[in-house]
Image (spheres, grey):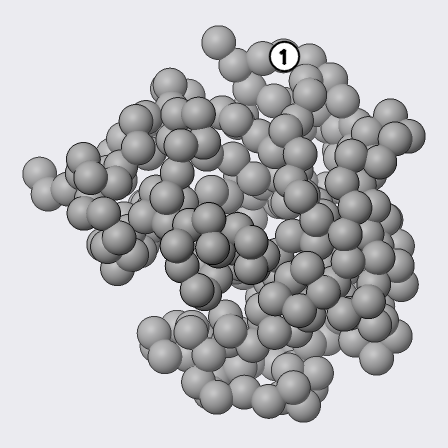
Amino acid sequence: MSGVELAARELAEARAGGKPCPPLRGRLLPEGDVQAAYRVQQRQVGEWLAAGQRRVGAKIGLTSRAVQESFGVYEPDFGVLTDAMAVPDGAEVTIGRLRQPRVEAEVAFVLGTDLPDDRVTTADLLRAVDHLLPAIEIVDSRVAGWDISIVDTVADNASSGLFVLGTTPRRPAEVDLRLCGMVLEHAGEPVSVGAGAACLGNPLHALAWLAATSARAGDPLRAGDVVLSGALGPMVAVTPGAAYEARISGLGSVRTCFTKEVHG
């Protein structure tokens, strides 16, 4: 099998309950070959959809300039969201579903119209967004020890896991996306703080990047898509049995919790 096929198989086995796999870069995929990594991602997503999952949107990663520099890249990456990844607000997550979960708070955009053009203005984006929601992304890695490069994370569907959306929709005009403050709490104590400016300067900038990138690839963002725009603060390793609540100024709150069961 090709390196792309072998990488997809190893990630699938880890996702299905196996142990995390060694890093893919320099072993199954060439160092720095992001296009090969996206082919691995596409292969996995195709299998999920063929098995009956439904595509519901996308997630954007690497939206922090500091994180980009640590990866040696100068733009974000993206992954696909399916209905199987969605968790209701406040619902308990069986931690054994995940390998190495971490949580981060984000602004979620829900689109009301398609974004078919590869050049978009802020006005285009504001017209296309139907509403905003607070979100917790439960990120995960099928690569052992989170020892990842840009190649590893892209191949692993941008280190996707699950996502939780709040239930307080807001119109874009109601929220200052650049200055909106965020606090993520565990047991009433802040474990991550940040603001909209941490996400490429403004979460709208992240959405613009994904809209243009998707349109150029021939798979534009569409009405109804949920877009997780990127972390507003540092991600936090999940403690089994813990509950996490994120509050974002102007958007309200969203909560998730985890069982004490640990994957063996």
The residue that appears at 18% across and 47% down in the rendered structure is 30
Closer to the camera, 96 or 122?
A: 122
Closer to the camera, 83 or 190?
A: 190
The residue that appears at 36% across and 79% down in the rendered structure is 216
Instruction: Answer above or below: position of 57 versus 129.
Output: above
State the image coordinates of residue 218 (x, y, percent, origin top left). Answer: 35, 77
* 229 with respect to 243 (left or right): left
* 191 with respect to 103 (left or right): right
Q: Residue tagged by mark 1?
A: 261
Mark 1 Cα within 10 Å, few/some/many (few <14, many 20+)? few
* 98 with respect to 105 (left or right): left
Closer to the camera, 1 or 21?
A: 21
Kind of residue sitting beneath label 1: Glu
Instruction: Answer above or below: position of 20 versus 60.
Output: above
Answer yes or no: is residue 10 visible.
yes
* 33 with respect to 141 (left or right): left
State the image coordinates of residue 119 (x, y, percent, origin top left). Answer: 48, 88
For this orientation, the residue located farthest to the left is: 1
Query: Residue 93: which quarter of the image?
Result: top right
Instruction: Answer above or below: position of 209 versus 253.
Output: below
Answer yes or no: is residue 15 visible.
no
Quadrant position of the N terminus in the picture: top left
For this orientation, the residue located farthest to the top is: 264
Closer to the camera, 11 or 146?
A: 146
State the image coordinates of residue 226 (x, y, percent, origin top left). Answer: 61, 62
The residue that appears at 66% across and 69% down in the rendered structure is 201
